[in-house]
Image (spheres, rainbow, N blue to C red):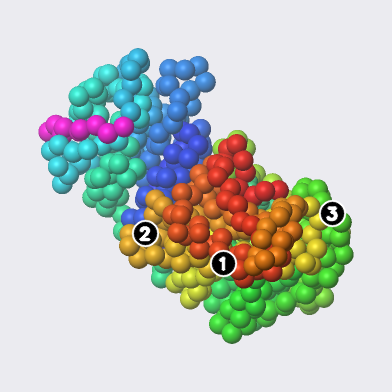
Amino acid sequence: MATASTDQKVIVLDFGAQYGQLIARRVRDLHVYSEIMPCDASAEEIMAEHPSAIILSGGPASVYAEDAPKVDPKVFELGLPVLGFCYGQQIMAVTLGGTVGHTEKGEYGHATLTRKGESRLLDGTPAEQQVWMSHRDAVSAVPEGFTVTGTTETCPVASMECASRNLYATQFHPEVRHTPHGQDMLSNFLFKICKLEPNWTMEGIIDSMVADIRAKVGDDRVILALSGGVDSSVVAALMSRAVGKQVTCVFVNHGLLRKNEPEQVEEVFTKQFDVDFVHVHAEERYAKLLDGVTEPEQKRRIIGTQFWKEFFAVAQQLDGVKFLAQGTIYPDIIESGARKTGGKASTIKSHHNLIPFPEGVHFDLIEPLDHFFKDEVRALGTALGLPDHIVYRQPFPGPGLAIRIIGAVTPEKLEILKNADAIVREELDAYNAKLFEETGERNSEHSVWQYFAVLPDIRSVGVMGDERTYARPIILRAVESSDAMTADWAKLPYDVLGKISGRIVAEVPGVNRVAYDITSKPPATIEWE
Ligand code: XMP
């Protein structure tokens, strides 16, 4: 959804998975709006986005490889400032008549950059400074009109520019934290070279999003599936700010949420926000459907299918609903294959098709977060007044506790797991909060990213007082991760582990043992089912 703050836009052409995202985030950190496009976008497609500048990302390929991604040469003729990093520098060089050499050794990690002569890009940064390198190939001869502005011991063209054509490039990666002056260089590019305004700020963004939503929705009604997760909660808060009671938030309670969670969601969206809140008590229907089901994928299918049934049952009873609001975020769009399908429009379509509209039912979609990264969504949530326990909620799977109970779900097992899980969360929330206080970073190196209890389908012998027990164990799972694709088991201090174990066994009836899962992903997954 376009907003006033997106009038200026920096397009990042992405030459390799993940590189583009990081650059776009760094640009946005400097309060300039940035979007990613696939590297093979034509100059016409790029211009259709009305960009103010273009950045060419790094990438894993070698520019001379047969299937190496190319850039449309017309990109350099548009009169727009262009900045290239790593592969971006190399592709700029070869496209404009320079040469790139293949080195056997390459250069990986910290390097010392020595500046040479004048440089608009490096202006104000030290004559000698640390930069981060990660490459095999490197520019060996710059194109006509370019000057070399920096070198390292092994890289004769560590940075180059042609100020008269507004073209700039570095072999190193200014976008990573290991290049301490990287943001200064990006800032030089955005504000001194491109003369942009830092207008991508939370207040401005919210105001213009609210205006856009009001214009789109008019007097119609909007429905929203609220899970209590960050994304749908932020959409709900935003829609509430924009159109108030015209929004109905449907909260399907499948009975598989964590202890006290349904009550918290209801409290926030009935007391704090002005929306029409429908709490669907589907606990008994889910319990019946899941009775005796042990296979994880079958559990997922049942829970997912029933969710939409419950949701559309409410939706169809409401009059005049035209829109369905969804918490789709930018990485969902990028990662669902924009690059492969060659354009955003087709990707959004395939993404939308995931909603199983019943026969004859249709709503137009509103996805106000579809250009936001996760940390921006959290910042929006905070600015809109959502409490920290929602904004900084850890990831929680849609099928809920059902996939943390190995084997069939029963009311007794659910009760045990909810109580044990509440203790795990209480202790590790406190552990994370202490780290946050000490480091000032919410996701510091040692903070735990996702943590929960698992209930396996076995019993073991124990002794409590003078009595032999034959009861259930709880497995503690706690991982460090940034995106759930890979995860490391958390090296929790023994006293924290000891306290969690002691409390669970003492406070949760039916549990006599706690084990800690010390497997990373891969080879394990984060969840047990
Ligand atoms: P795994 O277990 O695959 O989990 O390592 C990776 C991340 O995804 C979450 N997860 C799910 N989320 N529906 C969801 O919405 C699911 O069926 C599901 N399964 C796993 C998991 O909690 C972790 O953050």
Most distant residue in the bottom direction = 271
At 20% from the left edge and 33% from the top edge, which residue is drawn? Answer: 113
Residue 55 spot, x, y in % from top left? 38, 40
Q: How crowded is mark 1: few (under 14 residues within 10 Å), some or many (20 or more)?
A: some
Instruction: Write down the residue under mark 1.
Output: 503
Which one is closest to the eye, mark 3 or mark 1?
Answer: 1
Range covered by the magenta-colored residues: 109-118
Q: How far apart are marks 3 and 2 (CA)?
A: 42 Å
Which residue corresponds to the image point at 46% horizontal and 55% vertical from the top-left?
494
Label 2 residue SS: loop
Residue position for label 3: 293
Rendered position, 381 above or below 398: below
Q: Is residue 115 magenta?
A: yes
Any mark on residue 441, and which?
A: 2
- x then y, percent, for residue 289: 86, 61
The disc at residue 283 is none
User: Which three-letter amino acid code belongs to the residue tagged 1?
Assistant: Arg
Q: Nearer the viewer, residue 243 or 253?
A: 253
Report if residue 159 lies within the magenta region: no
* Prevalent SS, magenta region: strand
Above or below residue 489? Residue 119 is above
What type is the residue that disc 2 sits on?
Glu
Front one among 129 and 329? 129
